[in-house]
Image: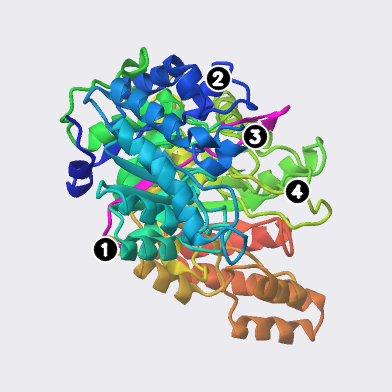
Amino acid sequence: MADLREMLSGERVHVMDGAMGTMLYARGVFLNVCYDELNDTHPELVEDVHEQYIRVGAEIIETNTFGANPVKLSSHGLDERTEELNERAAGIAVAAASGRAAVAGAIGPLGIRLEPLGPTSLEEARDYFGRQVDGLLAGGVDGFVLETFADPVELEQAFLAVRSRCDLPVVAQVTVGEDGVTEYGTTAEQAARAAEAWGVDAVGLNCSVGPAVILEGLERMAEVTRLPLSAVPNAGLPRAIGDRKIYVSEPGYMAQYARRAIEAGARIVGGCCGTTPEHIRSIAEVVGEIQPQRTSVRVVRSVGESSARKSPPPLASRSELGRRLARGESVTMARVLPPRTWDTLQMLDDCRALARAGAGVIGIHEDRRAARLGVMALAGLIGSSCTAEPLAHYTCRDRTLFGMISDLLGAAASGVRNVLLLTGDPPGAAPYPDYRSVVDVDSIGLTNVITAMNRGVDPSGNDIGPPPGFVVGVALRQGTRDPARELGRFHWKVDAGAHFAVTQPVFDAEHLLEFLAGVGDGGPGIPVVAAIQPLGSLRHADFLKNEVPGVILPDRVVERMRRAAARGADHAAAEGIAIARETAAALAGEVAGLEVAAHRGPGVGSAVRVLEGVNEAIGGV
C-alpha cells in the first residue's frame, strides 16, 4: 500500500501526477464547464486520467478538486454540494489508485482577497477550506496538497483548516512569476520559512511558470529549510493559439529539469498545467535512473526510444574546433555581426581577412534586436567559402523548443557543427511597450537538448538519424554582480554537456583569472576562451563601463583612453588596439584561447591588428 507519510519521511524521490484540466480539456470538456462537477457527471473521465498517470509511474495522484471550494463552486450554483463533490472526487481517486499510489486531496486558492486586502476574514476563509477538507476526508484521502497559492496568509488558513480536522501529511506549494516571487511579493525563501514554521510536512513550488524558474526558486528554498521539497512546474509558458493556450515544453526537457530539481533537493517531482502522461513518464524514468524503483509500477517507454540512442562521435572528429579542444590546443577566434542585408560579399571578404590574420574560428554574433541575416544561414556560407570554421551564436529568447530543434537540424544538414548557446537578454520596452520576451528553453536546457541530439535522438527520444556531432559552447559571465548564481548556472551548463565557454569582454586579465580560480575544485571543467574587444574611442569605453551590465572596465583603462582621445580619434583607436593586445598577451597560456570582436568599436581592421598580436602571444593558430 502507498503511504504518503512514509514517502515524505524517507529519503527517496517520488513522482506526482500531471495536469487534470489539460487532460479533460483534450477529451472535449469545454472551458465553461465546472471541472469539479465532472466527479459526479462524468466520473469515468476523471478515473481514466488518474489511471493513465498511475500507469506511467505516478506514485502520488491528486484529486480533481483544485477549485472545489464553496467560493468557486458558487459561480456554478454548486456551493451547497461542496462536501459531496469533494467526497466523490476522493472516492474516484482512491478507487483508481487501488493501493498503487497515494491519494492527495488537492486544494487551491479561494479566488478572493482576504483581509486586509479584501472583505473576507481569516476565519471565514478557514471555514470555506474546512468544508472542502471534510469532503476529502470522507472520501478517504491519504493527505493533502495545497497548491498554486500566491498569498501566504491564505495558504496558512488552508493549512489550519486541515490541521484542525486531522493530522494527515500536508504538502504546501506556492506559485511564483518569472521574477521568482508571488504576485503578493513573497519570495520562495519566505514561503519556505513560513511553511516550516506552521508545521507542514513538505513545501514546494508549482504552476504559473516553467521548469527553469521553478528550479531557481527550489534552489533558494533548499538554502533555508530542511523540509522535503516539491517541484511541480507547468510545461513551459503557454502560447496563445486562437482562443486556446498551448504548452509546448517537451517531455524530455521536463525530465531534464526534474533531474536538476532532484539534485537541488526535490523529493517530489511532477507536473502542473500542460503536462500529460508522456511528461510524467519521462520524469518517472529520470527518477528510475537515479534510484531503483520499489513499486510494482512499470514505466512504459515510447516505441523505439531506447534503441534510437547511439554513441556520440568523439569530440575531436566533429570539427577542427572540436579537435583543438580535445587535444588541449590553443584556439583563436574572431567574432562578426551579420549584415542587415542578404548580400554577403563584404561580410565574407571580412571573414577571409580575419582568417588570414590567424582566426581559426569565426563566431557569428546574434543580435535579436535588429533584422539581420540569420546566423545559421551565414554560418553555412562561411563554412563553404572561408578557411576558418563558423561558430554560430544561437539565442534561446523568443524561440520555441520546436523551432530551435528545426534550426539545429538545418544547421547539421548544412554542415554547421559549432554552436555557442545563449539564453538572451530581455529587450527594452521601446518601441513596443506591450511586448514581453519569452524563454521557452534556456541555454542550459538547450545544451541538454543538443547532448541528446549528439546521441541521435530528439528530447522525446525520437530517432533523428546519425548523431550530428555538435560542438557546444556556452557563455561565462565573469563580471556578474551575483557570482554565486552565475557559477551555479555555469556548473549546470557543464553538467548538461557543454564543451567550452566564452567569457564576456575582458579588459582586466587579473580579474578574469581570479574569477576562474574561484570556480571550485578542479577549475571550470571545460576550456575557457577569453573574449577580447578593441576599444574604438573614449565614448566606446564610457559606454561599456557605464551601460553594459557585467563588463569590468578598470578606471586605469578608461584613463588611458581619455589621454589618447585628447590627442585625436586616431590615437584613441590605436590605444584601444594596444590595450586589447596587452590583455591578450596577459591571458596567453592562462586560458584555452582568445576571441577578438570585429563588430564593435573600431571594426575588422583593428581586429586584424589584435589577431596579429594574439599570434605573437600564443605562437599562432
Q: Residue at x 78, y 47 (%)?
A: 370
For marks 4 and 3, the one nearer the N-term is 3
For marks 3 and 2, the one nearer the N-term is 2
- Cα–Cα span, label 4 and label 3: 14 Å
Main secondary structure of the magenta stretch: loop
Q: Which residue is mark 1?
A: 521
Q: Secondary structure at mark 1?
A: loop
For badge 4, the amino acid type reads Tyr
Mark 1 nearby-residue class (10 Å; few <14, some 14–19, many ≥20): few
Q: Which residue is mark 2?
A: 26
Q: Residue at x 61, y 32 (%)?
A: 76
Q: Residue at x 67, y 86 (%)?
A: 559
Mark 2 nearby-residue class (10 Å; few <14, some 14–19, many ≥20): few
- Magenta span includes 131: no
User: Residue 282, located in which quarter of the rendered image?
Assistant: top left
- Cα–Cα span, label 3 and label 2: 16 Å
Q: Which residue is mark 4?
A: 435
- In which quadrant will I find the N terminus? top left
